[in-house]
Image (cartoon, grey):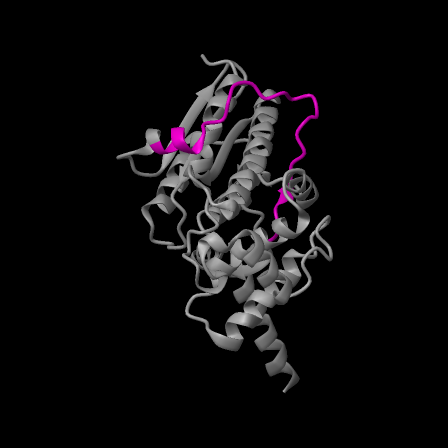
Amino acid sequence: MKKLIAAALTITLLSLMLLNSWSALKLYEPGKTIELKGNFRTMSEHDDLMRGKNWPYIVRLSDENSELLYYGSRHTSDPQDSQIGEIQTLWAEFKPTVAVTENRLGFFVGSFDMGISAFGEFACASWLGDQDDIEVYSLEPSWEIEVAEMCGEFEPAEVTLFYTMRVFLSERGTLAGEELEALAAHLLAKRGSRPGLEGSLTDLAAVDSLWDDRFREIGPWRIMPKNSADPSANPSRLGKLANLANEVRDRHAARVIIDLLGRGERVFAIAGGSHVVKQEPVIRAGRRKK
């Protein structure tokens, strides 16, 4: 019996070795002396530029010491999406020395396809980095930095509500009744525990009160449209929070990329296409072109 158990464990371990594993990506802290030049594109400018165009939006730039390939994707969790193969092809051609990607990822064990299903196209960066022994960083700022900047313009309770609703809209699916309430309560507890937000919005009764006071223009939050927490050129109050969150992330991502280019790296970057469109003028202004 012991031999059978040992054999089963060996087979299990070998099976796991054949699978890929992901973990939370390292955050990159850019140099504090980096000053951003130029202006990020506004949502209106973004919409004008992309009218009639399709994703991906790809930016390439170089100088005598460094080079960037920035892949602006259409978000996908489909392993068969053509973007997944295109990212791998571009990576092989570009031969990066470092990679950065939107998303923080997290611990996960499974096949490559399962990783794409879990983390979208951003799993590609982690997987390719592992294959080529190249460091892969997240383009996201720390939660401490992001929350502090958000709370500089909105009250902590509103920031907690935004973070909760952003995930709630993507995860509620067809849930209703007690299951829907349980999901919202779980997300609220998790998002409300971030540094700087603790105790700012304690339960769903507090959410209801805040929503009725400041966000009622959208309609009841439990059944609001799925895009209600998306960035927008003509935002609701919730949309203004979304716009600010993206601005904070865009500023940090631009600093990360400019810093790595300044270190002479060949940088392969992946982010949602809208981020790339908005960051492009600032990143170009921060680098000399051949």
265 is higher (above) or lower (below) than 130:
above
| Residue at 41% in and 54% down | 77
> Is residue 206 highlighted in magenta?
no
Query: Residue 79 versus residue 146: which sits nearer the camera?
Result: 146
Left or right: 24 with respect to 168? right
Image quadrant containing the C terminus: top left
Residue extent of the magenta highlight: 23-47
Snapshot quadrant of residue 201: bottom right
Residue 39 placed where, x, y %? 51, 22
Outermost residue toward the front in this view: 213
Image quadrant containing the N terminus: bottom right
Can residue 169 be seen here? yes
Outermost residue toward the left in this view: 52
Query: Residue 182 versus residue 144: which sits nearer the camera?
Result: 182
| Residue at 39% in and 31% down | 44
Can residue 19 be seen here? no
Residue 233 placed where, x, y %? 42, 37
87 is higher (above) or lower (below) than 221:
above
Magenta stretch, main secondary structure, is loop
214 is higher (above) or lower (below) than 189:
above
> Is residue 40 highlighted in magenta?
yes
Residue 215 placed where, x, y %? 52, 53
Left or right: 43 with respect to 145? left
Query: Residue 282 versus residue 111: which sits nearer the camera?
Result: 282
Residue 16 placed where, x, y %? 55, 64
Outermost residue toward the bottom in this view: 1
